Amino acid sequence: MTESAKGFNLIGYATSPMGLGEDLRSFAAMLDYLEIPFSVIDVPTDATGQVDVKWRLMTTNDYQNSIFFMSPMECHRLAQIHPTLFSQPQKRIGYFLWELPDFPKKHLGSLALVDHIWCPSRFVQETFFAKSNQLTLTLPLPVVSHAPTGRQFKKELNIPTKAFVMLFMFDLHSTMARKNPHAVLRVFLSFAQEHPESHLILKVSRWQNLGARALDWIPFHPRIKVIKETLLPGEIADLYQSSDCYLSLHRSEGFGRTLVEALQHGLHIVSTDFSGPKDFLNDGNALLVKWERTVADTKDYPHLSEPSWWAMPDEKNALALLHTAYERSQRGPNEQGKIDGAQFSHQALANKYKPILNTYLR
């Protein structure tokens, strides 16, 4: 094996503003930090090219290890179109995401396309463990906290300086049923009746190709603000700094990157106590919403071929916890959240990854 073969091919949505794209980008940034060379294959999406990338150690070489940052089903589709991506590398790793507690039997063949499976949380790991005997590791990726640009979102959105601001960010392609923004709206509208100084910011991504009425479900309300533009990483930091509380009433998350970002910026968290975020959210850094088990139908989640289940958050409990978040915000930011969010820095996770990566580079 030549020295130039010691590296990784990263395959995924490198320049698309989506969670799986950020998985690849954060892994690439960590390889830069560890001084491990890599190449990147940018798989096209409806939003390719919207994120600028620049890495020190990116090359055009082919390496002996390939990592696919996508769902198993998208991996299967890619294998049908570009089979050499799977036949050439010596070791194939799937950094796979599945956001339900069981994996469909119909798609088990997709898991066999890779030699090893990496996952962002124990929730996802347990799902694959139940259906596959492949080596499956929980390896959360860095969540990079970018320097703010100084953009004043409160001023732009006509929000008073001392207002209590809730934030929720989501990708419309991540499915409305899973992200559950309607529950966020209902809880906010109930809260706003008692707190006229409160505002809600919804940051919506990848809505453009869903038709002119894609956002008609959002009610017109003077204290509900919608941001539809693609933001630079530093502008995302500005948005967090303009907010006091992150409200996520998801039915399931594979990881929960925006929740980590909210911790890092000291926001108070009100979140469904289920799935991937349970790895890092606890009673010390968040207000955790009770839930009941409910059916996830095949129409609710992409590639779901048989009914599954997920959480139905208790909105009354969420409303009560939102009042607590408001009270806490009056005393200052979520300091424990900042401490716990720091565990996802490049430096912190590089120490965890380095010995594992070295086993692939021998």
Image: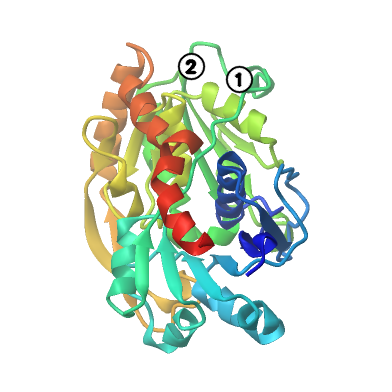
| Image point (61%, 69%), residue name | 64
Q: CA distance from mark 1 to mark 2?
A: 9 Å
User: Of residues 127 and 54, which is closer to you in this image?
Assistant: 54
Depth check: give the residue in front, 81 or 238: 81
* Secondary element at image label 2: loop
Residue 189 visible, this orientation:
no
Looking at the picture, does residue 275 appear above or below residue 136?
above
Q: Nearer the viewer, residue 132 or 51?
A: 132
Q: Position of residue 212 (x, y in %)?
A: 73, 57
Q: Is residue 38 left or right of residue 247?
A: right
Q: Residue at x 36, y 55 (%)?
A: 121
Please name the residue that numbered disc 1 is placed on: 154
| x and y, in percent, of residue 266 in the image | 41, 24
Screen quadrant of the N terminus: bottom right
Tell me the number on the disc at residue 52. none
> Badge 2 local density, few (<14 within 10 Å), some, or many (20+)?
some
Q: Amino acid at mark 2?
A: Ala
> Image point 70% across, 66% down: which residue?
43
Decide: is 258 above or below 242.
below
Q: Secondary structure at mark 1?
A: helix
Residue 121 as seen in the image, left or right of residue 89: left
Residue 282: percent from the left, percent from the top? 24, 38
For this view, does 97 lie left or right of residue 222? left
Q: Nearer the viewer, residue 270 or 63?
A: 63
Give the colour scheme shown: rainbow
**Mark 1 closeness class: few <14, some 14–19, many ≥20 residues within 10 Å:** many
- Asked if labels 2 and 1 touch by Cβ distance under 8 angstroms, the answer is yes
Give the residue type that dot 1 points to: Lys
Query: Which numbered tag is attached to residue 163?
Result: 2
